[in-house]
Amino acid sequence: MGNNFLGKLRQVFGARDFNKENDQLLHTISVQAMDARYEFGDMIGAANVLRMLLEMYGERKKQNHRQKGRKFIEFILSSKHQDLKNVGYKHWQNINKLIHLNQPKVYPYHQKNLEQAIAFFKKEVKGIHQINIQSTEEI
């Protein structure tokens, strides 16, 4: 009985590893890699990939743009209404807060915020679906 209970606890709370098929996702910056990391439970990794996707999209839109924070999000969403820019900035702040937590386990509201940010940016920024970059180091 004790081993069965401990086994279930390890299964629920233990660290999960990527299998070999998903190992390449550790070295990829793409929407598919972000979705796989989110579904796997790697919230920090998914937030990092989303942030990198948005930064790469900004660089593709204009070289050496040099905007940060609110100006960067307004630059990315330049053709959108001001309300959408404000919502985008709120999601950008939530992504950065999640990354700076740097904890493997996140609170449920962080998970919900990340899910909403992913859905928002996938819908509003069409160009991030075209970005697929292989990296030599783990992201």
Image (cartoon, helix red, strand yellow):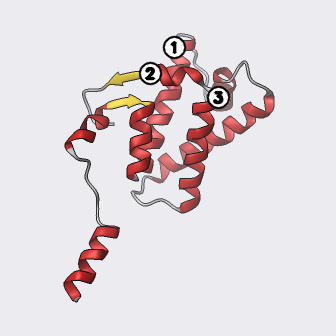
**As rendered, which of 4 and 63 lies closer to the eye?**
4
Image point (44%, 21%), residue name: 131
Q: Residues within 10 Å of mark 3 (few under 14, many from 20)?
A: some
Asked where in the image residue 135 lies, by quadrant, the reply is top left
Element assignment for label 2: loop
Q: For mark 1, what is the residue? A: 60
Above or below — where is 39 with respect to 50? below
Q: Work out whether mark 2 precedes mark 1 in sequence or the reverse, and give the earlier one.
A: 1
The quarter of the rendered structure image containing the N terminus is: bottom left
Q: Earlier in the sequence, mark 3 or mark 1?
A: 1
Q: Position of residue 75 (x, y in %)?
A: 66, 21
Q: Which residue is mark 2?
A: 131
* Amino acid type at mark 1: Arg
Tag 2 near tag 1, CB within 8 Å: yes
Q: Residue at x 69, y 25 (%)?
A: 74
Crowding near the residue tagged with mark 1, few <14, some 14–19, many ≥20 C-alpha atoms within 10 Å: few
Give the percent coordinates (x, y) of residue 66. 57, 19
Label at residue 124 = 3
Q: CA distance from mark 2 to mark 1?
A: 10 Å
Q: Is residue 103 left or right of residue 90?
A: left
Residue 101 in the image: above or below residue 119 = below
Give how far across and how far down residue 70 sits, in percent.
68, 31
Foreground tag (2 vs 1): 2
Q: Earlier in the sequence, mark 2 or mark 3?
A: 3
Quick check: marks 3 and 1 in contact, CB under 8 Å? no
The quadrant holding residue 126 is top right
